[in-house]
Each structure stands twice: as structure tokens, then as C-alpha cells.
Amino acid sequence: MEGTGAFVIGMVIGALVMGALVGLIPLILGLKKNKKGLAWGGFAACIVGSFILGIWLSIPLCILFVILILVLKDKTPQVDQQFDPQVNQQFGQPMNQQFDPQGNQQFDSQGNQQFGQPMNQQFDQQVNQQSDSENN
């Protein structure tokens, strides 16, 4: 009975290493294809499958996840919205172009007449007007 503990430890480590080696195939392929969920799912499935039935389950799981990674399409299109002219036309200018560091808002000419001064200057003028009216 002395060798059973070492046997179990060896079996667990062997299943972990074998599952990880087989799981590297869908992991690397999925990360290259930008399908992170399937990549990490296939890696974990191969490790768990290796614990359950050894290589007899981890290799079919690896093949299944490789097929899924290659067949399934991305759900979200990869669009660089910062440089896409349609997005900029639809949503206007980026926020950093609408406001300068001093707080001046840069809209059309009517907007500039209404909001030409920074907020702190408008507030200071209102406070000064109120204090002048209270003093009189």
C-alpha cells in the first residue's frame, strides 16, 4: 500500500500534463483566430477530459474545438471606429475635438455665441451680478 499514493500523484500530474499538451492545439489556434472563448474553453475541456478518460476523451475534445474555431464566424465585426468615416459622420466629432482644455465648447456659430465662455467664467459673472443686485 505504500506505492498507491505515489501512483495517484503520478496519475494526476500525468493527466494534467497530457491534457495541457493536447489543449494547447485549440488554445493556440483560437488565440490566432481571435476566438478567445473557444480557445480557453478547448484548453480547459482537454484538461478535464484527460482527467476523466485520459487521451481517449481529450483528443476528440481537441478535434471538436478545432473544428468549432475554424467553422464559426465572429459575432462582432472588427471595425476601427476611430478612423471609420461613416462612424465619425454619424456620431460627430470625437469628444476631445469638441472641448478644448480651457472648457470652451466648439460647436456651430450659434452654439459658440451661447456657450462661448468657460463654465467657471459664466458662473463667476452670475455670482457677481447677484451680489451687485443684492448690494443695491
Image (cartoon, rainbow, N blue to C red):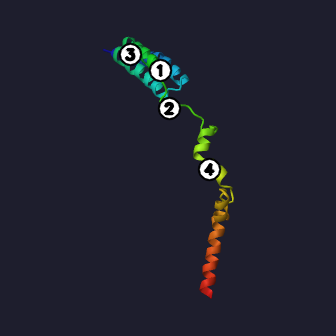
> Identity of the amino acid at label 3?
Met
Q: Can residue 118 be seen in this view?
A: no
Say which of 48 and 17 sits in front.
Answer: 48
As drawn, the label of residue 76 is 2
Residue 123, compared with residue 81, is above or below; it is: below
Nearer the observer: mark 1 or 4; the answer is: 4
Residue position for label 4: 95
Residue at 62 percent of width and 50 percent of height: 95
Residue 61, compared with residue 130, is above or below; it is: above
Q: Are marks 1 and 2 in contact (CB under 8 Å)?
A: no
Graded by Cα atoms within 10 Å as few (under 14), some (14 to 19) or many (20 or more), the crowding at tag 2 reads: few
Which quadrant does the N terminus fall into?
A: top left
Image quadrant in which you'd find residue 55: top left
Where residue 45 appears, x then y in whole percent? 40, 22
What distance separates the C-alpha of mark 1 from that of mark 2?
15 Å
Name the N-terminal-most of marks 3 and 2. 3
Residue position for label 3: 11
What distance separates the C-alpha of mark 1 from that of mark 3?
30 Å
> Identity of the amino acid at label 1?
Ile
Residue at 65 percent of width and 58 percent of height: 105
Q: Residue furthest top?
A: 56
Nearer the observer: mark 3 or 2; the answer is: 2
Residue at 53 percent of width and 24 percent of height: 31
As drawn, the label of residue 69 is 1
